[in-house]
Every structure is written in structure tokens, then in C-alpha cells.
Image (spheres, rainbow, N blue to C red):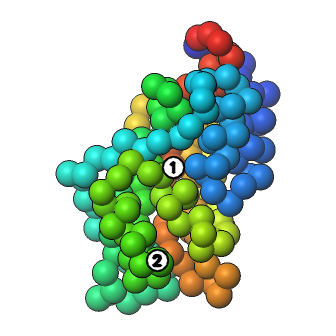
């Protein structure tokens, strides 16, 4: 794999793809298809159901909730085929989801963005960094933090996304 600097044009295109959609899941599907990472270019989530991280006071503030409001946590790897494109941590407010969405998130490998897409959320990026943020694993090439908001401005989710080198691989090769 070439250095991150050598991959800068590809990384710039990847960042543009992510910025073009409020759903990182949808953007990864677009990227997977364009890069030929897998056929079909379907994004699925591999959930670590044993993982839990309590929401910080800053997370609660960004979501606009008090200290007693229930917050769920989901840690997943988002894959296209067998390629891990993202390692994501997601804190979300179950009470702000439509009926059945929370159960779907708890029991399936459907990505969060696909489950909640009918809510018509918009994404507000809080942080973006080329390379690895402290909470991201080694091999991260791009780190994002964002809040997903409903049309009325209420936050439904805070997500920390760690995008992997697999996004920068040459189409059809390594």
C-alpha cells in the first residue's frame, strides 16, 4: 500500500463521496461500486454486540438530551464484500427512532444509516481528520465525527467513523 500522501488524490475523491450524502452507509455503497471493491457493492454491518461505551456529557449535549435519557451504543465494522471500509461507534437515542428501528439495530447486521434513512435525517460533521483520531484503530486513513439530526433539529445519533486503507486500494487489486 502506498503512503497516505501518495494516495491523496484518491483520498480527496473519497472525502467528496462521503460529503455528497447524509448517510455514510449510502456513500460507502457508492464508493464501493465506483472502486469495484465488491460485486454486488452492498454494505453490511458486522456488529460487536459485546461492546459498550457510555455516552460522554459532550455526546449528550450534542444530542440535546439530559443525563437520564436512555442512549444506545452500537460498534460496527462496515464491509463491502469482505473489505472492511469503516470501524464506527454510534451513540443513538432509541426514543427518537420510529417503532421497530431500535430492535432492528439490536438484532441485525443492517447498517444504522439504512435503518434510519426513512427518518430523513441530515448529517452535521463535527470533526474531520485525515489519518487516525485517538479513538480509531491503526490503519485509519480518515476520521469523522458527526451528529445526525431530524428535520426538527433533534439529534438522533453521534457517530465516530474510522475509515480504513481498503478505501484507497486500486480497483481490482491491492
Q: Which part of the image, by quadrant, shows the C terminus?
A: top right
Residue 155 image offset from top left, x and y in percent = 54, 78
Residue 58 image offset from top left, x and y in percent = 44, 75
- In the rendered image, the vertical position of residue 71 relative to residue 6, given as above or below: below
Residue 29 image offset from top left, x and y in percent = 63, 40
Q: Which part of the image, by quadrant, shows the N terminus?
A: top right
- Image mark for residue 161: 1
Of residues 102 and 8, which is closer to you in this image? 102
The structure residue drawn at horizontal position 37% and vertical position 42%, both measured from the top left corner, is: 46
Res. 94 image quadrant: bottom left
- In the rendered image, the vertical position of residue 123 relative to residue 96, given as above or below: above
Disc 1 secondary structure class:
strand
- Image mark for residue 173: none
- Image mark for residue 97: 2
Q: Is residue 114 visible?
A: yes
Residue 45 image offset from top left, x and y in percent = 43, 44
Amino acid at each position: 500500500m502506498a503512503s497516505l500522501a501518495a494516495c491523496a488524490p484518491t483520498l480527496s475523491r473519497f472525502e467528496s463521496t462521503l460529503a455528497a450524502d447524509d448517510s455514510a452507509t449510502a456513500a460507502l455503497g457508492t464508493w464501493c461500486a465506483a472502486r469495484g471493491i465488491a460485486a454486488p457493492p452492498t454494505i453490511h454491518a458486522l456488529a460487536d454486540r459485546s461492546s459498550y461505551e457510555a455516552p460522554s456529557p459532550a455526546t449528550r449535549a450534542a444530542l440535546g438530551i439530559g443525563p437520564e435519557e436512555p442512549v444506545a451504543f452500537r460498534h460496527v465494522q462496515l464491509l463491502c464484500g469482505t473489505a472492511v471500509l469503516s470501524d464506527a461507534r454510534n451513540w443513538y437515542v432509541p426514543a427518537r427512532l420510529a417503532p421497530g428501528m431500535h430492535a432492528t439495530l439490536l438484532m441485525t447486521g443492517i447498517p444504522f444509516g439504512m435503518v434510519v434513512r426513512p427518518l430523513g435525517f441530515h448529517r452535521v460533521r463535527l470533526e474531520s481528520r485525515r489519518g487516525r483520531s485517538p479513538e480509531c484503530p491503526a490503519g485509519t486513513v480518515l476520521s469523522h465525527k458527526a451528529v445526525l439530526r431530524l428535520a426538527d433539529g433533534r439529534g438522533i445519533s453521534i457517530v465516530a467513523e474510522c475509515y480504513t486503507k481498503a478505501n484507497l486500494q486500486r480497483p481490482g487489486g491491492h
